[in-house]
Structure formats: C-alpha cells, structure tokens
C-alpha cells in the first residue's frame, strides 16, 4: 500500500479524461467526482474504476462530448437526457438543475436517462449543502442483485444518499447501497485475496457463499439484510424504489435491462429504455421553516445522538457522514492509499494514453 497526494491523483485522472476527449471543464468535474470516492474512503468507486470508464468509452458506450439536455420539465421537475455521457458529469448537471428549480419554487426533482455510472451517490447529494438545501441522490446500476427468494439478477446495488445541513455540527450525510455491500467491495476483497462475509452473495443455486467470484459463476449479490430472516425484503424494496425513480420514471433501462458497467458483457438486444438512470432532488429548507431554525435543531439532533449511551464494546455513536469526513481529513493530509494492483492498473492506463503516471506519483 502506497500513498499519493490527492491533487496529484486528481491531475492524472483529469489528464486521462482529457485524452478521452472530454472538454476541459467536464474533465475537471469528472475527476473531482471520481476522486471524491477515494477521498471519502469509498475506494471501490474511485480511481480503481477508472479503467472501467475507459473500456466503456472504447466500446462507444460512453460519449466523451455529450449534448446533455432537458427533454421534459415543469417548474419543479425535469427529465434529463445524458446523451450517453459520463454519469460523473451528467449527474452534477441534473443536480444543478434540481437546485435551480428549488431556488425558484421550493423543491426540484430531476430524473435522468441515457447516462452511465455516476460515482458515489454522496457527491451529488452534498452539492445541495452549501445552498441551505437538502440533497437527494440515487441511481440504478448493473443487474447483479437477486430479490428476496430469487436466484435471478434483477436489480443493481442501487444506492441512496441524502445530505442534510446543520449549523455548527458537520452535515448529516447518508450514502448507502441497498445491498448488504456494494459490488466494488467484492472487487476490493478480491484484490486483497480475502473471502466475502456470509450474507453478501449467493451462488447460482441461491445458497450462501463466501466466494468473491460467485458472480462470475452465475451467483448474485443479496439485498440489504442478506436473507429473509434478517429483513432482506426491506433491502429489496429499497432497491426497487431506486430503480423505479431512476429509470422507470425517466425512461432509462430498469431491472435486468440496466446496462452492465463491465465492458465485456454485451448490452441487451431488447432495451426498455435509454442507458442508465439517476434521480436527483433538492429541497430548500426555508420552503418548510426558517433555515437557521432548522439547522440549529439539526445541531441539537446530532448532539443528542452523539451523547447517547453506548454499548460496552463501543466508545461513540456515529452520525452518518462522520467516518467519511474523518477519512477525508486524513487523506487530504497524508495522501490517498493505493494498493499495488491499483497502482499497476493506473500505470497501464498512463501507458495507454502516453501519460507518465510515475511523474504524478512522485509529485
């Protein structure tokens, strides 16, 4: 495990997006969104996935210069066509639109179609925080997840993020997959040569397994809860809601028709929509009560939970967003930790685009 400065890694990633043909501002934004995952400790969704975007671009499934446009709207809602662009760029466009509508009428809700993987959900919801707004972000994803009682892959990991500002306290930032674990966590375990905990995946026959390669042999990921006795039906319901809001509502592909992130799997020949879908929302706090009053009470809410009695094995109650914020502070100071396999991958990407990754690594 080695560390590389955040700004150096961001500069390298930005250069790669430029070499793919992205306009300068979009390359900057895409690299910022992607690196926000590494910065917040969500290593499964950061630069480790850069190669995945490149491969999709090479196959023509990602448009480096999309004409992102609004195809339907009302004062408080809109549908955005991402024109096969990087979700890392399409989703922020949609979130800015949601915030604009919230400024005008109190709330804004934008459903997106014809997009691609958009990085971590939390980046997009957190865009609303500086505007005294509550941000919402969700996306459907590659069908790798079986509903409770099924062996068929019908849903994605379908994350949900909600970001809520406070006054003196750090914001409340929920960002979670609707599965027991995100698919990227399996990839991280594989790189570490470790097994998956029971409840993460099942084999092709629906039996629990710890095999991190279970998906390659017909297995599937499991909804949050893992099994019916541990309320996997609730994870299944949450994932379904994300799929419907992100894709059925926008006109994107949903359920088993959602396009796979990996380039070696072909797109289905019977699509029910266009590309991948997202759902972004912004709620102006003062559309409900004075923002300062709300944020003062959010401080009180957070402080009350922080001070609550803890179990014998623990020393504090964690507020959603605490671990990611603390990791971010550490990584800004000490750099982003990268496994040897990721460093090798980035070096090969550098060779592919004639970019000296070693130069950035040493900065």
Image (cartoon, rainbow, N blue to C red):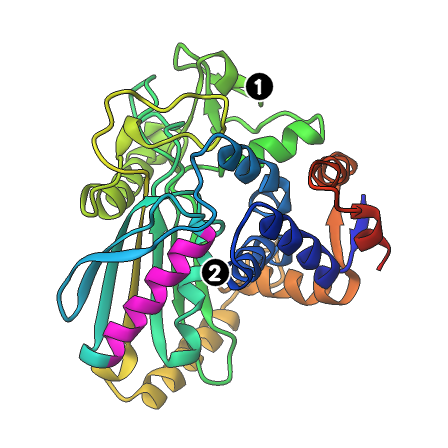
In the displayed structure, would residue 39 be above or below residue 50? below
- Region rendered in magenta: 88-103
Q: Is residue 200 left or right of residue 109?
A: right
Closer to the camera in the image, 234 or 304: 234
Closer to the camera in the image, 171 or 122: 122
Closer to the camera in the image, 150 or 270: 270
Q: Is residue 68 left or right of residue 171?
A: left
Q: Is residue 82 left or right of residue 18?
A: left
Q: Quadrant of the N terminus?
A: top right
Mark number, residue 211: 1
Residue drawn at x 47%, y 24% is: 201
Closest to the camera, between mark 1 and mark 2, is 2
Neighbours of disc 1 within 10 Å: few (<14), some (14-19), many (20+): many
| First-in-chain label (1 vs 2) | 2
Residue 90 is one of the magenta-drawn residues: yes
Residue drawn at x 64%, y 48% is: 16
Mark number, residue 186: none
Query: Disc 1 and disc 2: Cα gap in Å?
Result: 31 Å
Q: Residue 299's x, y, as percent?
A: 44, 81
Q: Residue 64's x, y, as percent?
A: 47, 47
Q: Is residue 301 left or right of residue 187?
A: left
Residue 30 is one of the magenta-drawn residues: no
Q: Residue 163: tell me if it is visible.
A: yes
Quarter residue 322 falls in: bottom right
Secondary structure under the numbered disc 1 in the rendered image: loop
Q: Residue furthest right?
A: 362
Quarter residue 152 falls in: top left
| Residue carrying label 2 | 123
Q: Residue 288: tell me if it is visible.
A: no
Q: Residue 296's x, y, as percent?
A: 40, 86
Q: Quadrant of the C terminus?
A: bottom right
């Amino acid at each position: 495990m080695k560390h590389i400065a955040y700004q150096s890694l961001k500069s390298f990633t930005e250069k790669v997006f430029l070499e793919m043909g992205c306009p300068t501002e979009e390359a900057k934004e895409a690299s910022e969104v992607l690196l926000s995952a590494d910065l917040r400790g969500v290593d499964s969704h950061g630069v480790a996935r850069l190669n995945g975007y490149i491969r999709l671009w090479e196959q023509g499934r990602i448009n480096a210069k999309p004409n992102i446009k609004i195809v339907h709207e009302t004062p408080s809602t809109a549908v955005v066509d991402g024109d096969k662009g990087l979700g890392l760029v399409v989703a922020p466009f949609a979130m800015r639109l949601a915030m604009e509508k919230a400024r005008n009428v109190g709330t804004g809700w934008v459903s997106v179609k014809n997009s691609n993987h958009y990085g971590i959900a939390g980046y997009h919801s957190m865009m609303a925080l500086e505007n005294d707004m509550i941000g919402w972000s969700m996306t459907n994803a590659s069908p790798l997840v079986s509903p409770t009682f099924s062996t068929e892959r019908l849903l994605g990991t379908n994350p949900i993020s909600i970001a809520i500002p406070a006054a003196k306290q750090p914001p409340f930032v929920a960002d979670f997959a609707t599965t027991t674990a995100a698919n990227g966590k399996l990839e991280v375990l594989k790189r570490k040569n470790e097994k998956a905990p029971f409840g993460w995946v099942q084999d092709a026959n629906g039996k629990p397994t710890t095999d991190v390669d279970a998906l390659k042999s017909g297995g599937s990921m499991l909804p949050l809860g893992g099994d019916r006795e541990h309320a996997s039906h609730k994870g299944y319901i949450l994932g379904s809601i994300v799929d419907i809001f992100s894709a059925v509502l926008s006109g994107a592909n949903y359920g088993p028709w959602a396009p796979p992130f990996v380039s070696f799997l072909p797109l289905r020949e019977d699509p029910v929509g266009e590309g991948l879908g997202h759902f972004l929302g912004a709620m102006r706090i003062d559309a409900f009560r004075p923002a300062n009053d709300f944020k003062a009470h959010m401080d009180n809410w957070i402080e009350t939970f922080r001070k609550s009695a803890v179990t014998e094995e623990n020393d504090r109650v964690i507020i959603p967003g605490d671990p990611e914020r603390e990791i971010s502070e550490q990584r800004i100071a000490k750099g982003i930790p990268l496994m040897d396999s990721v460093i090798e991958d980035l070096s090969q990407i550098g060779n592919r685009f004639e970019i000296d990754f070693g130069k950035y690594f040493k900065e």
